Amino acid sequence: MEFYDREKELRVLGDVLLRSKSEAKMTVLMGRRRIGKTELSLRCGDETVLYFFVGKKAESLLCQDYVREIREKLDVPILGIPHTFSEVLWRTRH
């Protein structure tokens, strides 16, 4: 798959990345299949980007997967077992 014509998107992600150094930021990339979302996230310029695919699963199961990714890739402790994304985000703030 070719990756081209994404300068604007890379600039936006670069700006978000810069702001995330001083305040928490979460960016969600959404779109049709096979348009380059994953490649865009990988090329945004930071190795600490957490890639998480959201499939058709119950929220509690998605949260388990997301918490595993956060623990493994970002080395952020999350206590307990969150069942909603708001719980995941709240627990990562404290």
Image (cartoon, grey):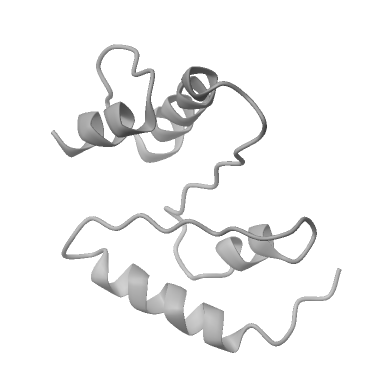
Residue 76 visible in the shown view: no
Q: In the visual, does 25 lie left or right of 14?
A: left
Q: Please state, as top left, top right, bottom left or bottom right, where the C terminus lies in the image.
A: top left
Residue 73 lies left or right of residue 89; in this view the side is right
Q: Pick out the residue farthest to the left.
A: 94
Point out the residue furthest to the right here: 1
Outermost residue toward the top? Answer: 80
| Residue drawn at the location 76% of the way across and 66% of the way down | 35
The x and y percentages for residue 36 are 72, 65
Is 92 situated left or right of 27 in this image? left
Q: Is residue 17 left or right of 11 when viewed as pictured?
A: left
Q: Is residue 51 above or below residue 17?
A: above
Considering depth in this image, is 93 or 55 the residue closer to the camera? Answer: 55
- Is residue 17 at all visible to an observer of this figure? yes
56 in relation to 6, above or below: above
Q: In terms of depth relative to the viewer, which is nearer, 43 or 65?
A: 65
Q: Position of residue 2 (x, y in %)?
A: 83, 75
**1 to 64, vertically: above or below:** below
On the image, the x and y values in percent for residue 55 come to 66, 34
Give the quadrant of the N terminus: bottom right
Does 8 appear above or below 75? below
Corner quadrant of residue 81: top left
Residue at point 73%, 59% (across, down):
32
Going 58% across and 87% down the picture, which residue do you hit?
7
Which residue appears at 66% of the width and 60% of the height?
Answer: 31
**Measured from the top left, where is residue 11 in percent x and y?**
47, 84
Q: How many marks?
A: 0
